[in-house]
């Protein structure tokens, strides 16, 4: 699943790296709070574990052998933040030294395998796994299966967007040539039928074994009730922000959002009120584009993501101001 | 991708010389009866995997120690130049700039003292398998419609495969071939540049270069520790699997093999946690307060760095003009 250089445009890689950076920053801050100076050796050893665990082959039922990616295992044993950092360091070492995955594509690979996979695994394991050994094993199998498929889906979408967003003037695809309708099924077919079951099997095996010999290892990363309830929301919103450029695929104009020229073509005339009012305010980022990015390759994609960030920042700011105003204690005269 | 491609024995005077038995390709014996194949498969594949990692690293260190122009250049300059070329390859949207960048890769290969034939064979093998085969269907009219260049299959206008209607013909198209060639050449340039950079720059030099460019020292230390202890954990895995191979007698142990894999992962995790504690205590004992310090700083050749910068600027300028 390591994407090599050449399949993704540098713009896509930059956007995905920018999407991963704040999540990894939060992960590093949280881990530093827990471990102080011990954070560096802890994450380093976890990364070394993440690298080496990918080399452990086990026999699979079809008579051959296979190894796991280890994202779910890392999430279960290290917790989501530790797993994200460990897998990121592992991916950096793999790309820089072992040529596994491209250097420009590192941001995309970190987003898929270092962020999406462990987060999905942790959420699934926490949701489906219970206190009983059977539930834990089931949660681990589901976490392994679904996490690798979530990463594969993200990879398929990123690859599939390339021919839609990046083509030469004569229509030649500049990067990955397969559109969404081919890239996503191709990725999912292999992962749903082969890689996913293998990942689930190996994750389940290891968790079952640990449950038998040292169950307290599995109880370490249980969050306290009510703590950080905003984290899942922030992650979902973050993923939605990254996916906003999907709007570029949609053709035409939504009903009721026509420009005066489009309306003139549709109904033959433009109402005078619309003519008067439509030009008064065009917005800070008109049409979700950033003026200084116009003409730059991939500027539309970056514009969409920046617009999403700006919108969220403004809404959050407005909410914070309102909260301050409404929560202020009243002083009686 | 970081496979060795240096001339054997070229590292005269090197402190590290790869033993012949490692270069010849080691690994457990995979010969045996059909009933033992599964056991040897998973044990053998694991042992071969660990040996391959060690082999790659030792070869890369050996090449990085050669006294060639590329190895004498400052790692910071090298990282900037190679990243600029990889970015230029990524942004190139036509063949001429990519051909120019790839030509500069060949020149860099020679400047790094790498064996050109072996280097080309290994990098193109990677590109052919991981990019060429994947891109191949994309060059046909099934994926990229356009002017047909060569007709591969003719089904006729009313051909069906069960309920699926087949196209009248399948052909290689002009935009498909152009796009495929772009992707393959871009991948070849990126793979070659990454390989030359990692082969001619030792890991610690690479981190020193990244550090000079603003990589936070803590991140550099994190990568250094992780990299170093990968080999400690690889030794743990190797010992476990050799012990298993030495002790196990009997027929195909599918279930037992799976149990071994689970136990190995568990033991590996415990070992990594114990190592983290030991390393942290050792760091504290040496006065670590959160800021790492690197000691020796070897001298780099300004002339070699200048040649590399000049070559990079020439390649980038040429790519810009031709692009």
Image (cartoon, rainbow, N blue to C red):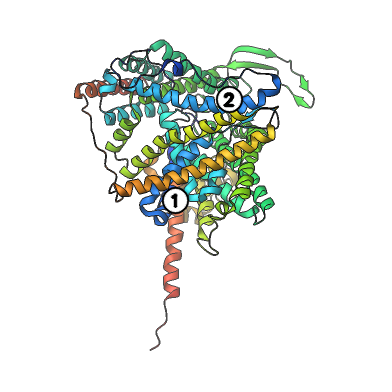
Indicate left or right for A96 with B254 as reference. left
Query: On the image, which quarter does residue B166 sit in?
Result: top right
Residue at image location 23% in from the left, 33% down from the top: B297
Q: Name the residue under label 2.
A: B44
Q: Which of marks 1 and 2 is in front?
A: 2
Q: Is mark 1 on a helix, strand or loop?
A: helix
Across and down, in percent, residue B223 comes to 38, 39
Q: Is mark 2 on a helix, strand or loop?
A: helix
Indicate left or right for A56 with B80 as reference. right
Q: Name the residue under label 1.
A: A27
Where A222 falls versus B184 (above or below)?
Answer: below
Q: Please state which of residues A102 and A256 is positioned toward the viewer in this rendering.
A: A102
Looking at the image, which residue sits at the far bottom?
Answer: A333
Q: How many labels does the image show?
A: 2
Across and down, in percent, residue B31 comes to 62, 17
> How dense is the environment of label 2, judged by Cα within 10 Å: few (below 14), some, or many (20 and up)?
many
Q: How far apart are marks 1 and 2 (CA)?
A: 37 Å
Across and down, in percent, residue B205 comes to 30, 30
Contact (Cβ within 8 Å) of mark 1 with mark 2 = no
For disc 1, the chain is A
Across and down, in percent, residue A325 comes to 42, 73
Query: On the image, which quarter does residue B229 sit in?
Result: top left
């Amino acid at each position: 699943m390591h994407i090599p250089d050449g399949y993704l445009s540098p713009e896509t890689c930059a956007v995905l790296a920018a999407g991963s950076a704040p999540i990894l920053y939060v992960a590093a801050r949280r881990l530093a709070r827990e471990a102080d100076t011990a954070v560096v050796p802890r994450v380093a050893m976890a990364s070394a574990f993440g690298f080496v665990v990918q080399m452990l082959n086990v026999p699979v039922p079809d008579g051959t052998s296979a190894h796991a990616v280890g994202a779910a295992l890392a999430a279960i044993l290290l917790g989501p933040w530790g797993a994200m950092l460990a897998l990121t360091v592992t991916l950096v070492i793999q790309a820089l030294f072992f040529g596994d995955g491209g250097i420009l594509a590192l941001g995309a690979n970190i987003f898929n395998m270092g962020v999406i996979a462990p987060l999905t695994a942790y959420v699934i394991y926490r949701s489906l796994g219970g206190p009983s050994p059977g539930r834990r094993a089931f949660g681990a199998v589901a976490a392994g299966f679904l996490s690798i498929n979530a990463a594969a889906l993200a990879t398929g979408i990123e690859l599939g967007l390339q021919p839609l967003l990046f083509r030469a003037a004569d229509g030649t695809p500049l990067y990955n040539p397969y559109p969404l309708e081919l890239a996503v099924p191709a990725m999912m077919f292999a992962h749903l039928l082969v890689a996913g079951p293998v990942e689930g099997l190996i994750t389940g095996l290891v968790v079952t074994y640990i449950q038998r010999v040292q169950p307290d290892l599995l109880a370490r990363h249980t969050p306290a009730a009510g703590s950080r309830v905003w984290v899942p929301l922030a992650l979902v919103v973050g993923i939605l922000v990254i996916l906003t450029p999907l709007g570029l695929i949609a053709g035409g104009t939504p009903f009721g959002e026509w420009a005066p020229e489009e309306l003139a073509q549709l109904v033959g005339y433009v109402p005078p009120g619309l003519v008067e009012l439509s030009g008064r305010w065009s917005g800070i980022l008109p049409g979700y584009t950033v003026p200084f990015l116009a003409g730059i390759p991939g500027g539309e994609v970056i514009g969409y993501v920046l617009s999403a960030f700006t919108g969220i920042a403004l809404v959050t700011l407005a909410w914070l101001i309102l909260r301050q105003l409404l929560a202020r204690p009243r002083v009686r005269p | 991708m970081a496979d060795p491609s240096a001339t054997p024995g070229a590292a005269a005077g090197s402190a590290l010389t790869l033993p012949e038995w490692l270069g010849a390709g080691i690994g457990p014996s995979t010969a045996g009866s059909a009933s033992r194949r599964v056991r040897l498969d998973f044990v053998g594949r694991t042992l071969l995997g660990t040996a391959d990692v060690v082999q790659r690293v030792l070869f890369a260190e050996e090449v990085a120690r050669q006294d060639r122009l590329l190895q004498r250049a400052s790692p910071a300059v090298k990282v900037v130049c190679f990243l600029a070329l990889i970015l230029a390859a990524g942004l190139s949207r036509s063949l001429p700039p990519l051909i120019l960048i790839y030509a500069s890769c060949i020149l860099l290969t020679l400047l790094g003292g790498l064996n050109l034939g072996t280097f080309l064979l290994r990098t193109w093998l990677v590109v052919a398998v991981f990019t060429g085969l994947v891109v191949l269907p994309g060059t046909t009219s099934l994926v990229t419609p356009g002017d047909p260049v060569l007709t591969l299959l003719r089904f006729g206008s009313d051909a069906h495969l069960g309920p699926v209607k087949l196209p009248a013909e399948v052909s290689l198209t002009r935009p498909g071939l152009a796009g495929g060639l772009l992707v393959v050449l871009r991948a070849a340039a990126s793979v070659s540049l990454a390989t030359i950079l990692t082969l001619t720059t030792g890991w610690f030099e690479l981190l020193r270069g990244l550090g000079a460019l603003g990589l936070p020292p803590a991140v550099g230390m994190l990568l250094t520790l992780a990299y170093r202890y990968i080999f400690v954990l690889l030794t743990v895995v190797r010992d476990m699997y050799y012990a298993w191979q030495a002790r196990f007698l009997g027929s195909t142990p599918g279930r037992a093999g799976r149990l071994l894999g689970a136990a190995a992962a568990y033991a590996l995790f415990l070992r990594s946690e114990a190592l983290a504690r030991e390393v942290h205590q050792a760091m504290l004992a040496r006065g670590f307060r959160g800021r790492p310090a690197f000691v020796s700083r070897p001298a780099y050749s300004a002339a070699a760095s200048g040649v590399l910068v000049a070559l990079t600027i020439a390649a980038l300028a040429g790519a810009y003009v031709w692009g």
